[in-house]
Image: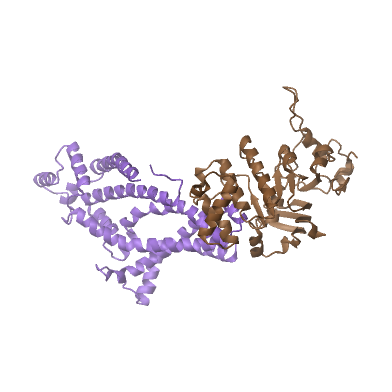
Amino acid sequence: MTNKHLLKINNFTLSFKSNRGKFIALEEINLGLDSGKTLALVGESGCGKSITALSVLGLLPENAATVEKGEIFFRGDNLLNYHKNDLRKIRGNRIAMIFQEPMTALNPVYTIGDQVAEAYRIHKGFSRRKSLDLAVEMLDKVKIPDPGSRINEYPFQLSGGMRQRVLIAIALACQPDLLIADEPTTALDVTIQAQILKLIGDLQKEMGTAVIFITHDLGLVAEMADSVAIMYAGRIIEEGGVYDIFDHPKHPYTQGLLTSIPKIDTPKGGKLATIKGIVPSIYNRHAGCMFYDRCPKGQNACFTRPKAPEPFSGKHEAACHFVDV
Amino acid sequence: MIAYIIRRLLYMIPIILGVALLIFCLFTFFGDDPVRVALGQHASPDAIANLQHLWGLDKPIYLQFIDFLKQIVTFDYGVSFSTGQKLSDMFMEGAFVSLSLTAPPFVFGIFISISIALILAYYRDSFIDHMARFIIIMSMSISYLVYIISLQYVLAYELDLFPIMGYEPGLESITYLFLPWLIIVIVALGPNTRIFRTLFLEETSADYVRTARAKGAGEARVLFKHVLKNALIPIITNTVVAIPFLILGAFLMERFFSIPGIGAMIITAINEGDFPVLKGMTMIIAIMYSFFNLLTDVLYSFVDPRVKLS
């Protein structure tokens, strides 16, 4: 059963130590992703999207994070059982990641050619010469003009969009099975965003890479994703195909998110719909639904009784007692 | 680059003029009258006038200042009041001795500190790291003097491994310098390692380090390739500014080991009220300080591609 998916996260619960004690960062996360598909992880800041991604890569801060339970299967093997060194061989090779800060994510004192070539040197053991040749090819693939001479440039000589292309080149250098893109376009202006998204989409098709998109931009989700998981306060509260989520949102939080998207026909001066309240503090966890106090449908049952995700049609499921069926 | 260096050298002229004026004023308007210091309380007015004339102290103030500027430009600071030796010769001799005392342990010490700091950064928060930090703090809490006296006593006096003190020019000097070298390395090891470790650890939380890890780089590659070169920038800042003090010599070391470096000369000059020596040395150190600032900026351009000297 676990072999069916490229990535399968089962009941994954993660806690962090802080000076105020231990708190749960992720609770009972279940996710599945098939080869070549795109999954969007959507949620507000601090809901656990990036932590989920870093868990898959094994890049969590070792002394602060503890896996409470669960499994992360990648190509049928549980990554949580991997030794550090074996995990390192997967990282950047079979699973790669791009981050949201292209301005600072490249090492300022090495040329971009060096930094792309490093992926080949680490994982393929190629010579410097050969790695650099491959780096030129890869930079050409991410549409950096004149890559042959650009490899000798330093990050500060490139624009934000170009740097993000370099980071994509680094991530896709070894043709990974899974690419995690953590808000890859947040720091870029809108025209560049579209170019970067198209680039990721094109390379995904070309290489057959599965992509996890971490974002809070619902427009981007509609465009890129095959399936969507909505996260709230460390839990996945609704998951389903992109059409299920956009056309038939079940959880009140998802519905709230979708109605807060500004519409082109919203009258000028009209008020934008919002979800009232703020995300609860990580220190105020309780067993019930974490959205309870902001939810228009919230009742006592929500607070006392957790709701396991409940499937509707196919793979669409939501964790709410009062979904509109 | 060369144009940049020339321009920076030109910028140094007003700075050095300012420093010269300040030093001149301090020595002219404050402190003892050098003639009185030289001749004592009961000198005859004739003798005082004579000496004032000989040292050019009877000229108008602005001419005295111009004389001082001439000295700076020609590197001819006149002669010592007390020994009659030419100051420029004294300086060259003393600087060589001071440098041979301080430069080797300085370079060697920084090399060791960087290595230890990298190892500690690699094993951060482990038992080794905690132990090392404990030892560093302990070693920093002990006075310089304790190291000098106890090592001098144990290694030189009790075990007779080195001469207790003294100095001879030429290759012989190494036998005399070895113990002071050892002490300088030991004393500088704690604070340097601590600073470098912190610098390395600060870098390890940078975004580019996360990218390197996501790329599959191991901890050693992250530290030795990515972090080290970035951390070199603050390390240069921290170390190059210390170089003028190397030439100045370690005052205490020269005193305790009777090494005739610049530090010892300055102490003697202070004791004897030897104004030309003090004035000249202060000026030379100020000039060197500006030079090493320039050197720092030039070194940056080799480490950091973002620094373009133009």
Q: Residue at x 76, y 48 (%)?
A: A234
In the rendered view, does B173 fall on the left or right side of B139? left
Palette colour of chain A: brown
State the residue lying farthest toward the right: A325
Q: Nearer the viewer, residue A160 or A146?
A: A146
**Count of number-bearing discs:** 0
User: Could you say where residue A264 lies in the image, as x and y percent from the top left?
Assistant: 73, 27
User: Could you say where residue B94 lies in the image, as x and y percent from the top left?
Assistant: 25, 59
Residue A125 in view in this figure: yes
User: Could you say where residue A167 lies in the image, as x and y percent from the top left?
Assistant: 59, 48
Q: Residue at x 32, y 64 (%)?
A: B256
Q: Nearer the viewer, residue B162 or A320?
A: A320
User: Could you say where residue B270 lies in the image, as x and y percent from the top left?
Assistant: 26, 53
Q: How is the image coloured?
A: by chain
Residue B67 position (above or below residue B218): above
State which quarter of the image contains the N terminus of chain B.
top left
In the rendered view, does A71 fall on the left or right side of A118? right
Residue A281 in view in this figure: no
- Output the letter for the chain in purple: B
Q: Nearer the viewer, residue B224 or B275?
A: B224
State the residue lying farthest toward the left: B46
Residue B260 position (above or below residue A274): below
State the residue lying farthest toward the bottom: B159
Q: Residue A9 sits in which quadrant?
A: bottom right
State which quarter of the image contains the C terminus of chain B.
top left
